[in-house]
Amino acid sequence: MGDLSEEMRMPTACPECGSHSVRLSEVKNPADKVFCSSCNTVRGIYADLKKELENKPKSETEQLLEEVVNKKGDAPEPSR
Ligand SMILES: [Zn+2]
């Protein structure tokens, strides 16, 4: 039997080792503990992790993309 776990990336880094990778059970029960995949520190339970993923601040890439979009929006209309 393989182990039923999968890895995910968290928006926050592990307080112990700075890794963003976490390991959690494939079953994904809300009460399942989520561990840091490099140092095995408990990062919290899946319910909290899910909340964190939903509330995560925009990544730098998304912020850059938004800036480009905003600049385009500021440009004067080509006609008129
Ligand atoms: Zn860690």
Image: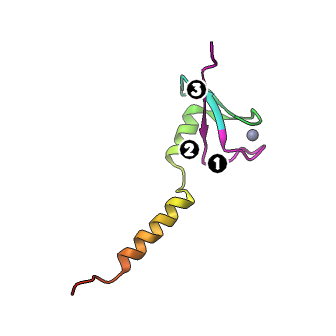
Of all residues, the one furthest to the top in this rendering is 1
Residue identified by numbered label 2: 52
User: Of label 1 and label 2, which has the lower sequence position?
Assistant: 1
The stretch drawn in magenta includes residue 2: yes
Q: Quadrant of residue 15?
A: top right
The amino acid sitting under disc 1 is Thr
The amino acid sitting under disc 2 is Glu
Is 26 left or right of 70, judged from the image as shown? right
Residue identified by numbered label 1: 12
How many C-alpha atoms fall within 10 Å of the one at disc 3: few (<14), some, or many (≥20)? few
Q: CA distance from mark 3 to mark 2?
A: 15 Å
Instruction: Check disc 2 and report its element: helix, strand or loop.
Output: helix
Residue identified by numbered label 3: 31
Q: CA distance from mark 3 to mark 1?
A: 19 Å
User: Of label 3 and label 2, which has the lower sequence position?
Assistant: 3
- Region in magenta: 1-21
